[in-house]
Amino acid sequence: MTNAIAARFGFSLLVPVALLAVSLTSAAARAQNRLYTPLPIPDTNEINDKLSERDIPTGDGGFARDYLVDLQDGDQVAIDLTSDNFDTIVTLMAADGSTIAENDDGPDGSTNSLLFARITESGQYIIRVRAFGETGGGEFNLKVTRLRPIDS
């Protein structure tokens, strides 16, 4: 009789434990998918957004926000990042996270960033918006322009 009770009691614990394990695994998978997902650049190629301490920590005391853009071989792009709230840095990265190009301060002498790049391989690229050092965050404007040669 004791063995029957123990077997029944063990089985009744096994089902809830298995369900709990499946539930925790599913929750972890959902959290992992949300952990890093660059935001898509809209068709307008322009974003007004806000950099905050809820974004990606850079390790320098600041934070970064990533955007995903599809670029084609031969594209020439200008990436313009402006903010009245923080000293901007814009980085263009390949899908594997390697840096293609980066700009801290634009040619006008301001703390805004203007980056020019020629794309040599079609694919998805990441544009990272971040603040210089610990300069904080705030509202910013990001604009991606595909440059076209003038027809002669």
Image (spheres, grey):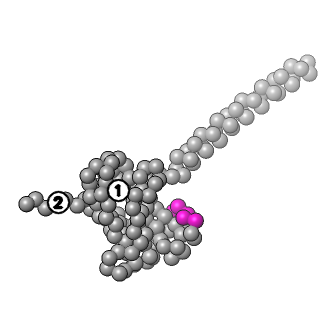
Residue 95 on image: x %, y %? 43, 50
Q: Main secondary structure of the magenta part?
A: loop
Q: Is residue 101 magenta?
A: no
Give the residue at x 63% y 39%.
25
Query: As rendered, which of 125 and 50 lies closer to the eye?
Result: 125
Is there any visible trace of residue 122 in the rendered image?
yes
Looking at the image, residue 147 lies above or below residue 32: below
Looking at the image, residue 19 lies above or below residue 98: above
Disc 2 is placed on an element classified as: loop
Q: Amino acid at mark 1?
A: Ile
Q: Is residue 55 magenta?
A: yes
Looking at the rendered image, the quarter that the C terminus falls into is bottom left
Looking at the rendered image, the quarter that the N terminus falls into is top right
What segment is highlighted magenta in the picture?
54-59
Compared across the picture, whether 146 is left or right of 32 comes to left
Give the residue at x 46% y 49%.
96
Is there any visible trace of residue 50 in the rendered image?
no
Residue 41's disc number = 1
Residue 38 on image: x %, y %? 44, 54
Disc 1 is placed on an element classified as: loop
Residue 149's disc number = 2
Quadrant of the rendered image containing residue 113 = bottom left
